[in-house]
């Protein structure tokens, strides 16, 4: 049995003044990618300089205006990477790079050396402030911890005086979620007083969910408490940096935005230490699905995935929100049917807003395609097979035919698992279009009899083979289909009725083929079956459908 008594619940916030539950997200925050720092340090095989440059260029292309490029005072490769960005003029004028550094004099000095030639930079200082880390890691009281932060702010301010570009200060009370709120406020206020920010030159206070310790609502309470207790709030950019230890990083971020956060630090697909940082793409696509501009260029998720997987050497999980290969796929029959009907309704009603069951967004809007929406296995149903036939191959199967053909595919899927669209089409040809034994339609000719005394207005002359032997007949009827069916009944000694008939074009233009579907009833046995025929001539397609159905009756 799990020894749950070894653990205790993290404290919550007594904050009855909270307002975030009644709010909605209405705009995108400032985004800051930390892929090249948090993300890179968590890789089994960290990126080399040229790989980091390629990743940086991807982030710029995606529209990130703030990018943490590393910890240049910590290693030579971090320093060299930043220098490459500067020397090769790879930093656009509207992009602000961010560098992380501990509150130590020699490290801050080295950081400013790495920034030489940068027009604007965020210098991000931090120290751990939680009760646990104060006690077991540093052995310091509150005042000693606060002095580290204050001294770091002073050092950055001193170096800023001789720096030709613009420096923005960012301070993180690391392990904020394990820090008493009054102390978090005290230490941030002390840093604020050193830096002396203004509404035109804000300080960034980054309040990280360094280790996710409680439910997202508690983090939101912590953020709103800080948001409402900061002095000179208009001189502060309130940033969050959530991790995903409890699997709630996205939820915690969204609630924190409701609680007053202005800025989000995270990574693509949530790469980062332990269970990762918050996935910025997930939050951005969530906003997009609610009709909010995420202010990132994320229309082509396939390109993002390709670069991410190649450089990070981490696959995107098949069920990862928005990015996974299977997230826009339905195996369930009821889901497939609902998606099929939803897509049809969108087209028929020409709706401008997206509303399709089980699909929160149109996959095409982020570079995905309709083809993977429905995939067929033993759990799939008639709607899924019909959707594949229409969306891939243009065959709009009559509703009554859905189950008949789905039963054919069900037998295959139970033996082998998933059935690919190409195999479904092969079975369709085998079961319907290529059914030419024992009866094989060859030629036909029709004559209009409206000027004669016959009760029927069409004469059909048909040539066909039966078990390879060529035969022919003439018959009259009310139109070509009726005439052919009457002739076949007499020739073959059968008693057949047409229950339903439908047709449609397979494509556009004068050269397009037509598909015809005929639902036949054998009056003697009460069995029903469908036949399908295709031809550039709709009458010929209909006759082929009759022969297809008769062959299926004989063989089934």
Image: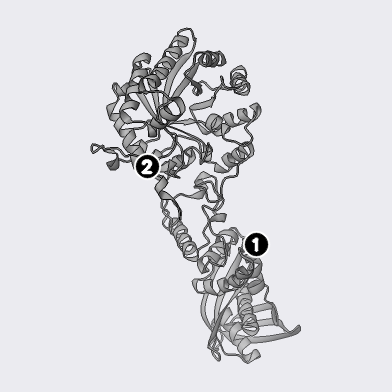
Seen as rendered, the residue at the extreme left is 17
- 10 Å crowding of disc 1: few (<14), some (14-19), many (20+): few
- The residue that mark 2 highlights is 216
Q: CA distance from mark 1 to mark 2?
A: 45 Å
- 10 Å crowding of disc 2: few (<14), some (14-19), many (20+): many
Q: In which quadrant of the rendered image does the C terminus lie?
A: bottom right
Image position, residue 95 (x, y; %): 50, 24
Residue 450 visible in this rendered orientation of the protein: no
Left-right relation of 78 to 141: right
- The residue that mark 1 highlights is 422
Seen as rendered, the residue at the extreme top is 162
In the foreground, 57 or 222: 222
Image position, residue 286 (x, y; %): 43, 44
Q: Earlier in the sequence, mark 1 or mark 2?
A: 2
Image quarter of residue 130: top left
Image quarter of residue 453: bottom right
Give the number of callouts: 2
In the foreground, 227 or 67: 227
Compared with residue 59, is residue 478 higher up or lower down, i.e. above or below?
A: below
Image position, residue 310 (x, y; %): 64, 39
In the foreground, 340 or 462: 340
User: Coloured how?
Assistant: one colour
In the foreground, 69 or 433: 69
Secondary structure at badge 2 equals helix
Secondary structure at badge 1 equals helix
Left-right relation of 30 to 391: left
Seen as rendered, the residue at the extreme right is 469
Q: Residue at x 39, y 40 (%)?
A: 252
Image position, residue 454 (x, y; %): 55, 89
Left-right relation of 293 to 439: left
Camera-near label (1 vs 2) is: 2
């Amino acid at each position: 049995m799990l020894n749950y008594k070894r653990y205790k619940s993290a404290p919550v916030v007594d904050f009855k003044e909270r307002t975030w539950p009644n709010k909605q997200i209405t705009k995108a925050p400032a985004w800051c990618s930390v892929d090249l720092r948090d993300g890179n340090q968590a890789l089994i095989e960290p990126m080399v300089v040229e790989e980091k440059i390629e990743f940086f260029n991807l982030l710029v292309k995606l529209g990130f205006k703030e990018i943490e490029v590393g910890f240049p005072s910590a290693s030579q490769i971090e320093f060299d990477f930043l220098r490459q960005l500067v020397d090769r003029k790879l930093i656009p004028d509207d992009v602000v790079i961010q560098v992380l550094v501990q509150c130590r004099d020699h490290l801050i000095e080295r950081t400013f050396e790495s920034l030489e030639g940068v027009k604007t930079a965020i210098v991000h200082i931090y120290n751990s402030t939680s009760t646990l880390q104060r006690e077991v890691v540093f052995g310091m009281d509150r005042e000693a911890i606060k002095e580290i932060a204050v001294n770091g702010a002073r050092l950055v301010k001193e170096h800023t005086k001789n720096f030709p570009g613009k420096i923005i200060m960012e301070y993180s009370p690391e392990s904020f979620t394990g820090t008493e709120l009054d102390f978090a406020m005290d230490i941030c206020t002390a840093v604020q007083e050193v830096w002396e920010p203004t509404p035109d030159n804000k300080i960034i206070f980054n309040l990280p969910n360094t280790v996710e310790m409680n439910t997202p609502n508690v983090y939101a309470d912590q953020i709103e408490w800080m948001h409402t207790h900061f002095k000179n709030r208009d001189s502060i950019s309130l940033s969050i940096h959530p991790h995903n230890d409890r699997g709630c990083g996205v939820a915690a971020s969204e609630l924190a935005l409701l609680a007053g956060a202005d800025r989000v630090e995270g990574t693509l697909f949530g790469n980062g230490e332990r269970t990762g940082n918050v996935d910025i793409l997930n939050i951005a696509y969530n906003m997009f699905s609610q009709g909010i501009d995420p202010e990132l260029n994320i229309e082509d998720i396939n390109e993002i995935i390709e670069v991410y997987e190649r450089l990070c050497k981490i696959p995107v999980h098949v069920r990862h929100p928005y990015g996974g290969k299977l997230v826009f796929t339905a195996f369930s029959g009821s889901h497939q049917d609902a998606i099929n009907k939803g897509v049809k309704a969108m087209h028929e009603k020409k709706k401008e807003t997206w509303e399709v069951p089980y699909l929160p967004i149109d996959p095409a809007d982020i570079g995905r395609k309709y083809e993977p929406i429905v995939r067929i296995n033993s759990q799939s149903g008639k709607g899924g097979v019909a959707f594949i036939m229409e969306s891939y191959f243009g065959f709009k199967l009559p509703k009554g035919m859905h189950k008949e053909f789905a039963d054919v595919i069900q037998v295959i899927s139970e033996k082998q698992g998933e059935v690919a669209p190409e195999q479904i089409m092969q079975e369709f040809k085998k079961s319907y279009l290529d059914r030419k034994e024992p009866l094989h339609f060859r030629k036909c000719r029709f004559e209009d009899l409206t000027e004669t005394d016959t009760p029927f207005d069409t004469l059909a002359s048909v040539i066909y083979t039966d078990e390879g032997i060529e035969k022919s007949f003439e018959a009259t009827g009310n139109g070509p289909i009726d005439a052919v069916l009457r002739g076949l009944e007499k020739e073959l000694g059968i008693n057949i009725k047409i229950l339903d008939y439908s047709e449609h074009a397979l494509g556009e233009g004068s050269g397009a083929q037509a598909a015809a579907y005929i639902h036949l009833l054998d009056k003697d046995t009460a069995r029903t079956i469908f036949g399908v025929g295709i031809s550039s001539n709709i009458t010929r397609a209909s006759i082929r459908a009759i022969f297809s159905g008769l062959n299926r009756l004989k063989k089934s």
